Amino acid sequence: MKEFSDIAEEAARAAGKLLREHYGNDQEVDAFEDHDIKLHLDVRCQELITGIILGRFPDHKIVGEEGNAGVEDSQFQWVVDPIDGTVNYFFGIPHFCVSIALRRGESDDWVLGVIYDPMMNELWSVEAGGIPVLNGVPIQASGRQEMAQAVVTVGFSKTKASMQAGFERYREIASQVRKSRMMGSAALAMAYIACGRLDAYIEEVISLWDIAAGRLLVEAAGGRVEMVASPIDSSKLSICAWNGKLPLHGTLA
């Protein structure tokens, strides 16, 4: 397990270093999409991560936002988001991260999760059954139990239907909580729940690579994560993650 974790952290830090080096510079854009941007740096970061992981474990598989690599039917699959928060990165907003998780096959058997924020030099990591840490220090989710005490973040996805659903969800909870935030990185939202900075995160349409590492972190830190197939895009997920104490069970029902 430690060998896997060491490689995940090495890959995340290497990709983060590349992001820091290019932060604030002119970015090569592969595609401008509605409500999104695809950078060539996304591809470069994933290639860097892939090279590090497959260089050590050539019989493993990489499943990433920028495509797959490695052995198709491998027992081990690395789920990678090379830049979670690409729009933030492009516009010079220093809130983005690298997210790497490992699972056995295509099952729900998750081995580890790593999230690295290169601008803050903060690395969250956890192994299955282990204690989640931030820069090596154990963390836990907040103890807040009342919605009126909570700070939550609601993500808004890219299609008209998903944005409308997000607005409806936001209206349901905005008046109940102390504050709400829209921050632009699902992985960091979940890392922040794991260490008590946020209390909950909800999004209607999200990809597995955005939240794979974060899910393991939140649950290990005492929080809860509910995911269902998105009613808007069945190939993606709807998610509610929280500190495990707020009354949010069944929010996605």
Image: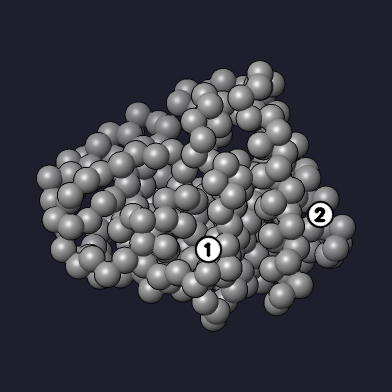
Q: Position of residue 214 (x, y in %)?
A: 49, 59
Please report the residue visible at 56 percent of the width from the left and 20 percent of the height from the top: 32
Please report the residue visible at 72 percent of the width from the left and 38 percent of the height from the top: 18
Q: Position of residue 94 (x, y in %)?
A: 51, 35
Please report the residue visible at 83 percent of the width from the left and 58 percent of the height from the top: 54
In this picture the colour scheme is one colour
Q: Which of 189 and 29 lies nearest the eye of the viewer?
A: 189
Image quadrant in which the C terminus is located = bottom left
**Left or right of 49, for residue 170:** left
The kind of residue on which mark 1 rests is Leu
> In the rendered image, which residue does mark 2 sit on?
52
Reply above or below: 149 against 29: below
Q: Is residue 89 at all visible to an observer of this figure?
A: yes
Which residue is outermost to the bottom? Answer: 129
Q: Which of 19 and 157 lies nearest the eye of the viewer?
A: 19
> In the rendered image, which residue does mark 1 sit on?
134
Instruction: Assign a secondary structure to mark 1.
Output: strand
The kind of residue on which mark 2 rests is Ile
Reply above or below: 18 against 110: above
In this rendering, the count of numbered labels is 2
Instruction: Assign a secondary structure to mark 2.
Output: helix
**Left or right of 187, for residue 69:** right
- Circle 1 Cα neighbour tier, 10 Å, few/some/many (<14 / 14–19 / ≥20): some
Q: Position of residue 40 (x, y in %)?
A: 70, 29
Q: Earlier in the sequence, mark 2 or mark 1?
A: 2
Q: Position of residue 47 (x, y in %)?
A: 78, 43
- The span from disc 2 to disc 1 (Cα, nearest Å) is 22 Å
